[in-house]
């Protein structure tokens, strides 16, 4: 269940169109906050809020240089998220639906 909670935060972060677009922008490489701001009609504080959300879920890294912050994707977390999505959307022997599968015996008989 722990993995579900971790990745639910990632998908919640991506559920905001602006944050999804920021991730798309960062897929091309590291960007300064000023470059991200050029694409949006938002204040620096609003961008900071979005970036904090993306950093907290693990998708984005930040580094300070001078007065600006530079952002990049955390490639490890992006790959882990891809694998998680592939895992939960694939049929598998250890699927959560197979746990306690005896609890619904007889359900098909009612159809």
Image (spheres, grey):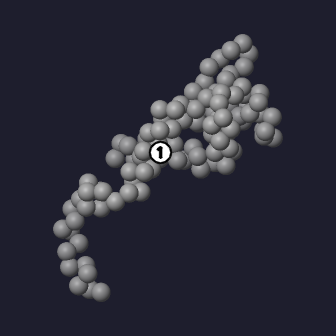
The image position of residue 73, as x and y in percent, is: 58, 32
Tell me the quadrant of the picture where the C terminus can be found: bottom left
Please say if 85 is above or below 80. Answer: below
Residue furthest to the top: 66
Assign a secondary structure to mark 1.
helix
Where on the picture, by quarter, is residue 43?
top right
Q: Is residue 24 above or below residue 110?
A: above
Using the image as rendered, state which of residue 29 and residue 18 is in the foreground: 29
Q: Is residue 5 left or right of residue 56?
A: left
Residue 74 image offset from top left, x and y in percent = 53, 31
- Can residue 102 be seen here? yes
Residue on which disc 1 sits: 82
Q: Residues within 10 Å of mark 1 (few under 14, many from 20)?
A: few
Q: Nearer the viewer, residue 76 or 14?
A: 76
Residue 55 at least partly seen: no
Please tell me whether residue 14 is drawn above or below residue 64 in the rendered image: below
Residue 65, percent from left and from top: 68, 15
Residue 108 in picture, x, y percent from top left: 26, 81
Residue 15 horizontal side relative to residue 86, left or right: right
Q: Is residue 71 left or right of residue 94?
A: right
> Taking 29 as reference, is 37 left or right?
right
Q: Residue most toward the bottom?
A: 111
Residue closer to the observer: 105 or 94? 94
Residue drawn at the location 79% of the way across and 39% of the way down: 39
Q: Quadrant of residue 21?
A: top right
| Residue ID at (64%, 45%) | 20
């Amino acid at each position: 269940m722990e993995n579900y909670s971790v990745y639910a935060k990632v998908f919640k972060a991506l559920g905001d169109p602006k944050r999804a677009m920021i991730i798309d922008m960062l897929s091309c490489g590291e960007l300064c906050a000023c470059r991200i701001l050029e694409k949006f009609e938002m204040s620096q504080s609003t961008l900071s809020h979005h970036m904090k959300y993306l950093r907290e879920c693990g998708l984005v890294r930040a580094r300070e240089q001078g007065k600006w912050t530079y952002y990049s994707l955390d490639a490890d977390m992006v790959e882990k998220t891809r694998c998680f999505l592939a895992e939960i959307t694939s049929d598998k022997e250890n699927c959560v639906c197979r746990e306690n599968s005896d609890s619904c015996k007889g359900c098909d008989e009612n159809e």
